[in-house]
Image: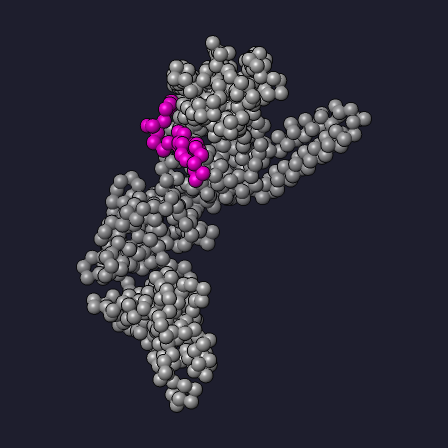
Amino acid sequence: MSEAKIDPAQLSKRAFIYVRQSTQTQVQRNRESTRRQYELADRARSLGWSADQVEIIDEDLGRSGASSAERTGFARLTAEVALGQAGIVLGLEVSRLARNNADWYRLLDLCGLTDTLIGDADGIYHPRRHNDRLVLGLKGTFSEIELHAFRTRLLEGLRQKAARGELRIPLPVGYVWGEAPGEVRFDPDEEVVHALRTVFARFAELGAARRVWLWLVEEGLSLPARQPAGGPLRWVRPSLAAVRQVLTNPVYAGAYVFGKTRTERRLDASGAVRCRRVAIAARSDWQVFLPEHHPGYVDWETYEANLERLEANRPAHLKRPGGAVREGPALLQGLAACGRCGRRMYTQYRNGRSKPDYICTGGNAATRSCLCIAGSQIDRAVEQAVLEALRPAGVEAALQAAEQLEADRDAALEQLRLAEERAGGYETMRAERAYRAVDPENRRVARGLEREWERRLEQLEQARAAVAARERTCQRRLSAAERAAVLALGEDLPRVWHAETTTARDRKELLRELLEEAVIELSGDGERIRLVLRWSGGLRSELEFQRQRGRPAPLCTGEETVELVRRLAEHYPDRQISAILNRQGRTTVKGLRFTRNRVAVLRTSWGIACYRAPDDPPEGDLVTVVEAARQLGIAASTIHRWLNDGFIAGEQLTPGAPWRIRMNDELRSRFVDEAPPGYIPMQDATRRLGVSRQTVLQWVKNGKLEAVHVYRGRRKGLRIQVLGDSPGLFDGTA
């Protein structure tokens, strides 16, 4: 029955044998299946095709049939069928050709249109016949269902094993799998464990991932790294991303997690299906989460506290205090909150960043700001309150500082010694053994191993030099005199607070440990400051004191600049006025560039009202050159040229100010597709009038001649209306 479906027209075409297996592992291990697919060539010859007509397509070995996106062999087979070059397509089974109905039915339609047969191990089918097409459709559907069943079975098996914590997923550096099911151990390399513990210890002290990274770089320490697909352990230069990855990975807190990402499919610009991995943020949506699964470098409470600290270090929302500690003397940076609207106040500095101001921008459009107050007096009050609160714990804090200093020295020195041991105890000896074991006659290999041995010896010398330098710069333990000096400082906290070695960052770090928020508000007529401090323990304290106002500086801005600002304020907002003044090279009294705030201060000082849009604007809108060019359908350079020539009128209050063009019907009527009758090109007009081009443009500007601009057709440009009574060369007005 199968041979009866073959006619001479199909035998005159070629027979294609499609060979495919899903993975490289199947290609290497399931060789019997591969051999059976190649033997289909003998079947094609037995059906009547000659040996030179049989073509084997095996480009897709090791590729899944779930999609045709990456299968070049299937694409070539489809192209040959569409071109009518195929008489029969043979595959061991339908699943070899396609595992999804979209690709399968597309191939069936093409075979039906080009009179191409499809054959498998069960028989030969003609897609034009309804019964055969029904059988092929059912086989394609079963093939797709079979793939779904395979995937579901495998994924459920992985999930069940992961739910018990026994699925051996890739572990981050610092952990290895043990022999028992689900057993996770610390890395046996002592240097790896010490490096990771150092990262967590430094973050607990410094409170910012970036500062931990800078400390590692400053100390010359390295971090361990391993390729995602496995491979040897490498020691690399620390990076901020690596430090954050260590601090945010829940595995280091002893948790076993699975299913933290999901796959999203989308179409790119070319219509191809693309897949990407997307992280799942919510912990409740993870497929498997097993806390206390294995020993961690930190406990779970510390891990969550670290995440909260990292989140607080991000640029915070206006209604929430926080943010990482930054440069500048303002003590309440990130902690100050407005007592009127509750928003977070940001910090601004004056006099070369020496005097801070706390500003809240929660006001309406009329007031521009909710609260703006000088910060020096507030910082002094907060400083005094903090020192009073720390006085009972001063000595205890000094002892902890001494112990911490010794621990820091020990951590860095121990890490360098472990690096020296790694460079000299293992890597160098391995390179030496490899060099001594090579055959001396094999000179090329011997030279390469000799260079590797020399490189390891250089690394050993560098590690020894780093340890020696570290030992010279720091002592093993604090001396008795140093410890006594530290304890004396503990009894005199103001001296420590105001010491030259105590930086503004140190003060603010200490303040973050004590305060959660400081609410600033003005009471009465604005002459008294009320400060509410919320301490970390939940207590609240209120401070109220008289507001000190500095003597205002004399206004010495030049009269010319003031008058210019007065004229510009009628037409432009403060931001645009500052740009105009800067383009003209003008500066403030102190030689600074103008900003929006400085223009606003200048207006307020001289009683200049801010810009307000007119209630009854004139006909037409004032637009920029770029917007006028867009509306008229010409280039911006043409607008500038016609402004200079006087063909169109523009407004410019002062040199450096932007041109503004009034867009109305009269202006639009000057730009046409075709020239009206009586309008001639500029060259003909100059010849007829007997004057130069500049004179014609001057007459257009004075209104003595009418002109239009043609921006379509072969001859674009100005057209001049020249009548019998037009002015001539000897006209007195020329």
Q: What residue sits 78% from the left and 24% below the top?
A: 439
The x, y position of residue 544, in whole percent, is 24, 55
Q: Nearer the viewer, residue 311 or 492?
A: 311
Q: What residue sits 46% from the left and 43% below the top?
A: 210
The x, y position of residue 196, in whole percent, is 49, 32
The answer to whether one can see residue 716 in this image is: yes
661 in relation to 117, above or below: below
Q: Nearer the viewer, residue 32 or 132?
A: 132
512 in relation to 120, above or below: below
Looking at the image, which residue sits at the far front? Answer: 8
As for residue 686 lying within the magenta part, the answer is: no
The answer to whether one can see residue 149 in this image is: no
Side of 558 where 181 appears, left or right: right
The x, y position of residue 706, in whole percent, is 35, 76
The x, y position of residue 256, in whole percent, is 41, 23
Which stretch is magenta?
262-290
Q: Which of 610 and 669 is in front in this view?
A: 669
